[in-house]
Image: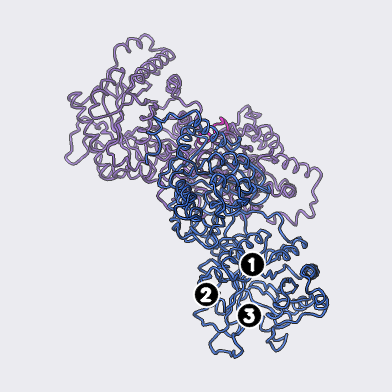
Chain colours: A purple, B blue
Amino acid sequence: MVNQVQRGDGTLSSRSDSSAASASGGDSSKESSRCSTPVLDADRTDRLRYKMRRRMESGDHWFSLEFFPPRTASGAVNLISRFDRMGSGGPLFIDITWHPSGDPGSDKETSSMMIASTAVNYCGLESVLHLTCCNQSKDNISRHLSKAKHLGLKNIMALRGDPVGSDWEEEEEGFNYAVDLVKHIRSEFDDYFDICVAGYPTGHPEAHSYKEDLIYLKEKVAAGADFVITQLFFRAETFLKFEEDCRPSGSPCVCVQGYQSLRQLVKLSKLEVPEEITRVIEPIKDNDAAIRNYGIHQALEMCRVLLDSGRVPGLHFYTLNREVATMEVLRQLGMWQEDPRRPMPWAVSAHPKRKVEDVRPIFWGSRPKSYIYRTQDWDEFPNGRWGNSSSPAFGELNDYYLFYLKSKSSKDALLVFEVFTCYIAAQPNRKGHKVMCLPWNDEPLAPETNMLKDELEKVNTRGVLTINSQPNINGKPSTDPIVGWGPPGGYVFQKAYLEFFTSSENVNALLKVLKKYEPRVNYHIVNVHGRNLTNAPDMQPNAVTWGIFPGREIVQPTVVDPVSFMFWKDEAFALWIEQWAKLYEDESPSRMIIKYIHDNYFLVNLVDNDFPLDSCLWQVIEDMFELLQTGLDTGDEQATIFPY
Amino acid sequence: MVNQVQRGDGTLSSRSDSSAASASGGDSSKESSRCSTPVLDADRTDRLRYKMRRRMESGDHWFSLEFFPPRTASGAVNLISRFDRMGSGGPLFIDITWHPSGDPGSDKETSSMMIASTAVNYCGLESVLHLTCCNQSKDNISRHLSKAKHLGLKNIMALRGDPVGSDWEEEEEGFNYAVDLVKHIRSEFDDYFDICVAGYPTGHPEAHSYKEDLIYLKEKVAAGADFVITQLFFRAETFLKFEEDCRPSGSPCVCVQGYQSLRQLVKLSKLEVPEEITRVIEPIKDNDAAIRNYGIHQALEMCRVLLDSGRVPGLHFYTLNREVATMEVLRQLGMWQEDPRRPMPWAVSAHPKRKVEDVRPIFWGSRPKSYIYRTQDWDEFPNGRWGNSSSPAFGELNDYYLFYLKSKSSKDALLVFEVFTCYIAAQPNRKGHKVMCLPWNDEPLAPETNMLKDELEKVNTRGVLTINSQPNINGKPSTDPIVGWGPPGGYVFQKAYLEFFTSSENVNALLKVLKKYEPRVNYHIVNVHGRNLTNAPDMQPNAVTWGIFPGREIVQPTVVDPVSFMFWKDEAFALWIEQWAKLYEDESPSRMIIKYIHDNYFLVNLVDNDFPLDSCLWQVIEDMFELLQTGLDTGDEQATIFPY
């Protein structure tokens, strides 16, 4: 049953003007002596309070989304997929609730702390972590905050939390109210965190009066809170009155909207449902569809009143970890970003350390979370010239088996070539299962790769097992819906790229063929043990994606980098075993086939440097097959290639 | 009278294999933690001995050119122009002779030291500085070497030099032979310098025998010399025998060729002219043209014999500071680079510190020597992202009046607009003088700028006084003879650029017009006192020239950078006064006009970011003129623009 509930909140202008002065400076890299990155998106580097302020100044309404931590590991995997989907709609931030009984600060994959960290680091979402202080020791609270800081979290919603048991009493030196937590955060962590506090449009259920509650709110703001999220409410008037009463403290306000089991929420919030709502709901309470429609309708109505009032810069949604109804309301309000602008061709992480990250090796293009995980301990992110610098090492290979990186592959896939072909074609295999991902690809084919579908399908059936590719692009507008990224008014470019596993027989032919394509085609060829066979000059990185923008230096976010390729090679080969072979019994034919491929195949990547012409990479593969058919002069072959 | 003389020299493979191991490392930036530059041209960063070795390995013959220091300042100006012209033919290196009586180590503009420094720093030529040690104190020699090192010289030709006076005797602790100097350089400066020594194919005139002389040569090589240049010789056989005799020490050899007053050279070298040559020359000794033709013919013959022998990797020419005959021989040998590849769109300096320099502001495009001079004290050259880093300051403006930067302008130019127009049109002004340069342009219009000639002419007649411009280029091959640069197989791009002085009335109209062109056109507008009026986002640099190459990252060597523009502004305005107004008497009308322009005009630069389309900058200027004709609403104008 999906019901409709409501909630209001308020944003207070940030607490001191001295902090505003450092708006664009702060801990950004601009102050370092390192050459700096062209700033493509100021939003990416700003803290939440400044993003809010800019949106309020420009009158651009925002929305934000609230989630609770999942109960199970598979629930976590689903929630993270949801983050990716809902993140694309353009929320200003998301927030993760905190339930003291659920070990919320632990390293468990389901904890509030880890979910918020994943949202920031892997999904690139600006996130607010809730934190309650009731019945907590100072040390414990500080430990949570330090951990949050270490993980790259920048925003805390400071709450008292419900006392456990009914025998709660104020402690002399303890955290009795949210204001104590706000003071503690400011005294221990100075200005590092943006702090959010709760407001109660109908007064806190335990407060003596609505008026007294307003005084508490002002205390929290005076102690250093940057903005306010209110408790839910059912009527627009409730919020608008509250906003009016807060106005003396100068608070611009935000409206809030949510869905889910009405009963459960009402119980949690200790609020009463207005009669006009129960009156409608009672007769249809067994009809889920009717309740949902009514909820969407009610939410839309209230949101429109609030937005039209001109006193509401944004809307905050209780998603209760669902997405359909929230997305529907946002779509109807015209607030859901239908064509999300990509700031970069890859998904940007929101970790403060990664603000300056502006280039990645192409290899992890379909496994971005693995790349982020394996580079999480880097102090600096190589900007501009990537592989040549004395890069810090990649994280150990066996580190990256994060729960949500685990395979979704089914073991019903049998013949290897067929699996690749079915994946490319997005078609069911012979057992009727759609192949939606491969060990080397977390998601189905990108729309851009779909442009190459026919060619990819053809070569996969012949044993060129493609795991990554991009078409060449010669100056498409940066707003192009498929290949565009970066600010408008620019042009994006790509060199054609193809990466695949193939047999040593094919590689021998390929190396002969590639001589004809010098210097147009650059290649790297390696087997599981082997050294890198390449014609890359001086082992320099090759930029394969770049963009030209008004008033900016060139941005080159994707490179084929020889140094990182050797790390990727280890990962790419390991995936055959870890994510595929292990689906089958020891000594089973399936496992033996996969083991054979792992031990004997080569990983190849090819770049066509002549980006304005049609890609020649398909012709390279065609030439390779042709040479194989006409027969190789194997005599001289043995001497020249692969003395492993 | 131009006669023909000959000289041979030898290159010895470098002295130890331990040094070879650091071939591509050394003092290059690769070891720093700074992000490194894509290496477009390995030759640019290598030391001379490795360049030689690579050329020998590939069988690619080289040539090199010897010059002596000029006697007068105007001779120096001419010699430096000659360096630029002869440098374009592709010599592997040039060398500058050392004449102890001429104060060769001083700071005078005519000293060997300063001429070599200019060749390296401003002309970008790999250069060898001769140094003699006879009758010199250790301190003196060390001082010269330290100075050479400080100036960025990397190669020394270590010579004994002729004793001054006939009463020379060996000194106990002194420098008696070149080998003493070689030892001193290696002991004081370790491996910093590449050392060249002299060889004598017919034996040193003072040596007891040819054989004894070979022993001295071996000693010099054992002491640390990297290669040998021989004394001149007249017959190919002389050199080939010498090469054979040296072979035991493993020396690959180089042939040498020169021209000039035979008598003078013979006197200096204490060599005898073979009879077959004097026999030809005697009868034609009063016919300069005949002597020259004979000399070229003889030189060609000998060079061909030497090259055909397969024992000569290159040719060294005594130019005696002339260019015609040497260039003729080299052209006929097919060794003169007719289409010199530009490694960068600007002339690269050969100072070791500048090896990583890969980007410059466009403003000094026509005054590259001034830019090099004003940035000579920088420790690091901004690579990739230029202006945003906390750049070291530019050298003081009054520092840069180097003798060879002094104006060549004639004072016959009278009306300012006309001068600009005549410069663009390459036409004579009303007094019949061709305007070949302007204070802001050292040379006549570049071929590339010539593409814009008609448009430039038109706007200059109307008071838009252009000093710098480039057309937009949307992906021309890097081998394009006019706009190409960098290695073959790449593509070069440009955004259209226009820089000019114009009146405040024009600027007021322009600013109105530019609003229509947001964000397509970026601008910077400033007067002699003023702050920078700009729409550049966050004052970031705008890349206006870039190139895409096989297997490389993007190279972006020219930017419009807001920080350096303010330094350029000072220089550009100062040139009105220093190089133009001062040609006229105080209070003269000409001087007053120029002073007025200096005080009241604005310096404007415009970039059209939409490089694939036709440049809109001419339309911007046209719109400005149109607005001026239809009349400005001056009321609101005053309020918005230029509150100086």
Instruction: Determine which residue is flagged by label 1.
Output: B94
Q: Main secondary structure of the magenta part?
A: loop
Residue A371: where, in percent of width, then height?
51, 44
The disc, 1 or 3, on the residue closer to the chain's N-terminal end is 1
Q: Secondary structure at mark 1?
A: strand
Which of pointers 2 and 3 lies earlier in the amino acid sequence? 2
Q: Amino acid at mark 2?
A: His
Task: Say whether residue A198 is left or right of residue B529.
Answer: left
Where B323 falls versus A412 (above or below)?
A: below
**Residue B31 location (% of width, % of height):** 52, 60
Mark 2 and mark 1 on one chain: yes
Identity, as a three-letter code, of the amino acid under mark 3: Lys
**What secondary structure is found at the residue carrying circle 2?**
helix
Give yes or no for residue B273 being in the magenta stretch: no
- Can residue A383 be seen here? The reply is yes
Give the Cα separation between the discs numbered 1 and 3: 22 Å
Task: Give the residue pinned by disc 2.
Answer: B144
Query: What residue sits 81% from the left and 44% below the top?
Result: A630
Chain at numbered mark 3: B
Taking B103 as reference, is A629 above or below it? above
Residue labelled with disc 3: B220
Magenta-drawn stretch contains A481: yes
Question: What span is in magenta?
Answer: A478-489
State the image quarter where residue A619 is shown: top right
